[in-house]
Amino acid sequence: MRTRGVEPGELVLLAGFGAGLTWGHVLITWPPPTAPPRVPARHPAALAT
């Protein structure tokens, strides 16, 4: 991985460990998918549709 990096669409597992036996992990697709921006329901742009 150090020579080629992470290719688009690959899965990446991130793990972390801390004091007190705490731990966490997440599995993501790289790059993360982009979502359209969310418009609050009371925003004038949302009311115009």
Image: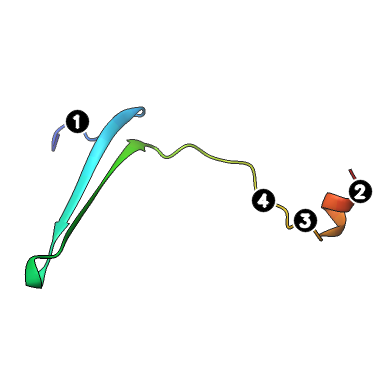
In the picture, measured across the screen, residue 8 lies left or right of residue 41, that is left
Q: Which mark is residue 4?
A: 1
In the picture, measured across the screen, residue 48 lies left or right of residue 38, that is right
Instruction: Mark 1 vs mark 2: give the one in front.
Output: 2
State the SS at label 2.
loop
- Seen in the picture, residue 10 relative to 21 is either above or below; the reply is above
- At 16% from the left edge and 57% from the top edge, which residue is drawn? 16
Residue farthest to the right? 48
Instruction: Mark 4 vs mark 3: give the one in front.
Output: 3
According to the picture, the residue beneath numbered tag 3 turns out to be 41
According to the picture, the residue beneath numbered tag 4 turns out to be 38
Q: Are marks 3 and 1 in contact (CB under 8 Å)?
A: no
Task: Kindly report the distance in space between the C-alpha atoms of the residues bearing marks 3 and 1.
Answer: 44 Å
Q: What is the quadrant of residue 13 in the picture?
A: top left
Task: Kindly report the distance in space between the C-alpha atoms of the residues bearing marks 1 and 2.
Answer: 47 Å
Q: Are marks 4 and 3 in contact (CB under 8 Å)?
A: no
Q: What is the quadrant of residue 22 in the picture?
A: bottom left
- Seen in the picture, residue 29 relative to 18 is either above or below; the reply is above
State the SS at label 3.
loop
Q: Which mark is residue 48?
A: 2
Image location of residue 1, percent across then percent down:
14, 34
Q: Are marks 4 and 1 in contact (CB under 8 Å)?
A: no
